[in-house]
Structures are given as structure tokens and as C-alpha cells.
Image: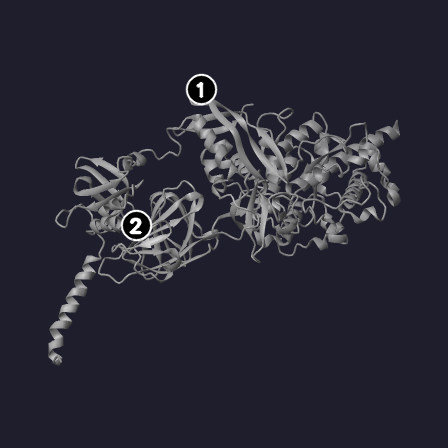
Amino acid sequence: MLKPLSFIPLFLCVLMSVSVVAQEICPTAETLIALNAACSTSDLDSACNSSGTITPLDQLANDESAQLIRLSGASEGTITLTLVETRLTAYEQGEIVGAGIEIGNSAGYNVNLRSGAGSSFEVVGIFRFDERLITDGQSADGAWLRVLLDDGTIAWVSKSLVSNDPTLATLPIVEGDASGTMGHVLTFERADSPCAEGQAGVFITTESDTTQRLTVNDLPVTLTDAALFMSLDESGVTFYALAGSGTVGIGENQQTLESGDVITWVDEPLIPDPMLPLPALDIIEALAIEPEICLVAAMDANTDPGAPLDIGMSYIVDALRTSDSGLSFRLSTSAVDENWVIADRVRTLGACDSLPDADAVVSSPVFGAGQTPEQIMYSYLSARLVADASQMQSLSCATWDSQALLQSQSFRAMRAELLNVACYTVSQTGSNAVVQCDGVIQTEYNGELRQWELGAYAMTQESGAWRLCGETR
Amino acid sequence: MFKQRHLFFAVCLLAVLFGAFSSLAQEDIDLTPPTLGDFDPAALAGIDPADFPVLPALTDHARVIFERGQNREVPRNPQMFSKVGDSMTASPNFLVAFGDGDYDLGDYADLESVVAFFNTSEENAFNRVNYANALGFSTASALDSTWAVAEVCEPNESPLVCEYRLSNAAFALIMFGTNDVMAFDEVLFDYFMREVVLATIAEDVVPVLYTFPTRPEAPELSAVFNQIILKIASDYDLPVINLIAALEPLPNYGVDLEDTLHLTLPEAPGSAATFTDDSLDAGYTVRNLVTLQALDSLLTELDLLPSET
């Protein structure tokens, strides 16, 4: 029997052990490389940890030790989730709430929803002219889209009657009588650890060109050949797009993520705090992620990079500048004040060679400067399809301004798209040019297609940039 | 001789008085082009379509515009009107049958004179091809040269101006709202509608406006747009056919619920120009009837048709 005082050294010993363990689980490149090695034999649709313990999917809900999860996705794609200082608290195969793409009715009137992918199928509902629905799949010929109605009914709508969205082509081909989209639904929480905020989270990656879908912490997420980092804190989550593209959320709150985008989500998407850091560069490297953006990190605690950077973190930069003192990088931030770091004093990863020159941008304040007349004309036509009046007006000369406003609105009641459009400059004299555009604007209204032939356009230079100034047909 | 001299002086006196009156009427009306964003919702307060008659009287300004059209180097043709609007106006069910002689005025035989007035040749105001109406047409389309028919319209010419140039019409029957209400807010509709009306006035063509059938998908905004139309008619002192009031007693207010872009048709095919009780339960028939009645009234007041009394 031990005396009570004899417990004190034992308690201290245990405490020190826990402390050592806590330090050890702070992420490093080595721990992640070891994790990948330990999990090299794990199968698809399983989880694994640094001890090499493999948990099949049907037991994953109870596995809080999971550190690397590989999931099967659409079109034989794979989704990999690497947990950093994060615990999986729930997993299920469930209907992905709101997974899919939101569509609007572009017909301008109520259209039929049918029980199958074809106009011969029974009408099972109405897609109101002002309604938005979520489609999660398409028919084999791509002509019909599947939607799940509020009452659980699965219905189909003709793709020709919905808002034109190129991502619709990425929808999986689905069968008519299948249930709603089933997928992986996961919930994570930040693990108790001594690591700094911003280091804890989940890397979500896929190398598939097919859009992959899952739900994490109640948020529908899609990603296409992408790498996202989801940082967790007490109030919400922050998504960083390191490569590829994706979306987070649904409906009017749905946010598109392109490389370099950062979105904080607390009940709804918010503007993130300035200079939110990412995990260390060597961790991102260890995961074999090749960022399509430029990341920088402090070299060490003794090297002053020019702006305060936390050791063990990395930061997104969005521009460079070359001055007498050498090359500098601008930290991507929503703050008004710019923060610059000296390139020689930071480590870099990703696309740092292709950053825009901040000074070059400043020296070209005229919108569209440097673009050819045909480029300006094509931009104008493209803006017209989405009724972007301000863009069209900024591409127009002063006397065409009111016409630009009109033209931005005159196809609003219908769906419009450019077909086989090619613009080229046929003549140029001083500050005037004529651009010929071949092809058509095709509109769809009340089920009727109509094509509007493009023609020749008068362009003029104003303040050093080409502007549309009229028709010359 | 004496009589002739007196008649000459009387005509001169009338012309002077009419000129003075015309100038006065014009001075009161602000024809300044609108500025986007000028729309004031408060200005619509108290405007209720139910308070307006279905058929308009000839307004002072309309008379001035008409006279100006007659004084052009090539006078506007009083026996021609332009049909300006969306697919309900482009529809073969709107007035075309009267130009083709395929109609039955029923109890409204007194409208024969107005039909005859415009039915001047095989191709006439009722049935000629118009260039300022089309499927999907909105107020913005009418002003946008993209929508002008390239074969007949000039570069940069709007469909509206192109139509007036080609038709040389003295009157324009203008109905918009059905497509606009699904695409624009009040600010844009007010702006574009004023632009359409002012472009018509600038061409010395008398605008005859319509309130439009309520779009079932957007009844509240339809009501506001109709208030805007009535306000514009008031601001510019123009005749307006209160179609929404005429359609009020009809089933579903004369709107085809299977195709809410359009008015209802009578069950008998091609009978929107047949003014029987059954046929007059349909929206297109009612529009045809009130249009002929309005034109009859305007022509009579302009002394282009004899007064019944």
C-alpha cells in the first residue's frame, strides 16, 4: 500500500507524460509523413491513424482517433481528409443536404416538373418562374436535370429551361428512380492541443476532375481537383482554397472558392479576419499539395521578414513589388493597411513567380487599357449576357453609355448565350476602329429559340482604352 | 365671295387659337428625358386603376402631337397606327383579323367606321408587319437597336424609331409590362417606359398607352407597374386605355393561366375578332374591342370620323 504522499511524484510523472504527448501531437511534416507511411495500406472508404490502425467506414462514427480518411466520391474519384489537431466526432452516409447546384427558372414562366427525364413523363409539379431549386444530377444525354422537391419527390426539369450555368455539365449522371444524393457527412471539432489557432483543421483534397461533394460540419462542400484547408475555431470554420475550385454552402449563401479565396463561416459567410494564417509550409508540402497560390512563412524567429509573421504558420500573398531594396511580397489581407514582407527573408511555396506586380496595376488605372478593340467588344458582349450594366458602361464611350444600359436590360426577360462568337478588328485609323463580330446571341423565350446575328461595331479610344461607340452594320 | 372670305378668316382664327392653345398645352408638360433613379414611389400614392375609365378621351397634348405630325414635311398618316409591345401585341389575335376582313362586330356595328378608316388596303394598319413588337419584347427592347430588324432598320436605329419611320403612323398603340415585370424593378420600368413614350412623342406620333394584364406570378409588382403607366400618361397628358379595368370581370382577369404571358382566347378558333357574348369572355377579344372603341373615340374627337350625334 502506497502512502498518500507517494502519489505526488507519480502524478507529476503522469502530468509530464501528458505534456510530452501533447507537444508531440502538434503537427509537423515528420508526423504527417509518418502518418502517410503508417496508412499506406489503408483501403478506400476507411480511416487510419499514425499507429496504423485502420477503421472501416461502418465503424467510423465511433472512431475519434482517425487522422487520415479516404472516401470514395463521384465518378470513381477520391476525397482525402487529413486531420490536423482535429477530431472526427460524427460520420454518416446520408443525404447531402443541398448538395448540388442551384438553378433558376430562366423561361420566364412556370414550367413543368416531370417524373422522368423526358417530356412524355407525368407532370409531378411546377417549377415556378421565380423559384430556385437544387439539382443534383443529370440525365445520360444531359438534357434533363434531377431535382429533389421539399416533399421528397424526385422530379426532372428540362435543362433548356433553367439558368445557364457551365457547372451543370459537371453533375453526375443519375438514374431517374434513385433516391436523393447520398454522400459522406462528417463533423469535426478542434482537438484540445497546445498548438496555435489556425493550425487546427482538416485538409480536404481530391485529384478528380469530377466535382466531388460532401458535407462537413453541416456545410455542403464541393471541390474539383482541389485542395481546401478548413480551419476550426470555437465560433465557426474558415475555408482556404489552396488549389482548384469549389463551393461552400447553399442557396444565396453559397460561396465559390477559387485558389486564394478565404471564407469564414459563422452561421453565414463572413469577411474573414485579415491575415488569417495557414498551417506551416512544410505540412502543406508533406501532404503533397501544390498550391496554385503563393504562400510565405517566416524563416525563423530571428529573421525579421518586414511584417509580423507567426512562426509555424504560412500566409497567402497576392502581389509583388520590386524596389531599390529588392523584391517584396504583399500579404493578402482584407485590412486597409498593406503588409509587405521582404522576399529574401521568407520561405515560399506555390505560384510565387506569377504574382501580379502591384505597381504595374497602379500605373494602369484605365479600365481595359492595353486590350485590343476586339477584346473590349467581346467583353462587352459577355457582360451583356449577365446584364452587367456597369461593366458594359465602362466598356462604352460616353455617347454609348445610355445604350449600354438599355442593352444590359433588353434580354433580361429571356435566357441568352453567345454562340460561335469571334470578334476581330477589320480596320483601324488612329483612335477609331471597326470590329466585326461573327456568331450570334441566342435567346430562349417561352420555349422559342431566336438568334441575333452580331455585326460590325465602331470602337474609339478614350483615355487610352478602346470603347464601344456604336454599330456600323 | 363674302362667305368664302368669312370662312377663310374663321379658319385662320381657329388656327391661331389652336396654335396658342397647343403652345400652352406643351409648355405645361415637362418633356425632359428621364434620369435613371429619379423615380419616386411616393408619386404613385392614390393612383388606383379602378378610378380610371377604360376608354380615354383625347387629351390636349395628344391633339398637339397629332397636329405636329400633320405639319411634318411628310405628314404622319392618320390612317395608320403602330402596334408597340410584347407578344400579346405581336399576336395574330390582336387586331389582325380586322385588317383581313375576318371579323364580326356583333352588337358593336357602330365600330365599322373605325375599322373601315384604318382598313385602307390589303395591307393595312391592322395586319401589316410591325417592327416594334416581338416575343420577349420589353420597354428596353423597344429602344435597343439590337432588336431592330437589320434588313429594314438603320444602324443604331431603335426598333421603335425604325417602326415609326417605316409605318409613318400617326398613332402608336403601346402596351408593355408583361415581360418587364419579370425583369425590371419599378425604377427601371419607369425609366424605360418614359423613354419609350418620349421617343414616340419626339417622332410626332400620338402614344396611346394601355394598362397591362396582371401577371399572376407577380401581382403586386404588376399593380405598381400599372400605376406607373397611369402616372406617365398623366405626366405627359396622354390617352391611356385602361385594359386592366376592362379585363376585371373576365374569368382569371382574361389571363391564360396555362400561359401567363398571354390573354385568353375564345373557344372558337380565330374568333377574337367576333364580338359575341361568349367571345367577349376572352382577354384578346376584350382588348380588340376596347382598342377599336378607343380609336373610334380619338378619331371622332379629332374630327377624322363623324360624331354619332
Q: Nearer the viewer, residue B284 or A197?
A: A197
Quadrant of the drawing holding the N terminus of chain A: bottom left
Give the residue at mark 2. Answer: A335
Can residue B191 be seen here? The reply is: yes
The quarter of the picture where the C terminus of chain A appears is top right
Q: Secondary structure at mark 2?
A: loop
Give, as a three-letter code, the residue at label 2.
Answer: Ala
Write the residue at 44% across / 19% down: A429
Mark 1 nearby-residue class (10 Å; few <14, some 14–19, many ≥20): some
Near-viewer residue (A63 or A357): A63
Q: Quadrant of residue A411?
A: top right
Residue highlighted by disc 1: A428
Q: Which element type, helix, strand or loop, lies under badge 1?
A: strand
- Image mark count: 2
How far apart marks 1 and 2 lie (CA) works out to 44 Å
Q: Percent position (x, y) of residue A150?
A: 56, 57
Same chain shared by disc 1 and disc 2: yes
Q: Amino acid at mark 1?
A: Gln
Where residue A314 appears, as percent x and y from the top left, is 24, 48
Q: Closer to the N terminus: mark 1 or mark 2?
A: 2
Chain at numbered mark 2: A
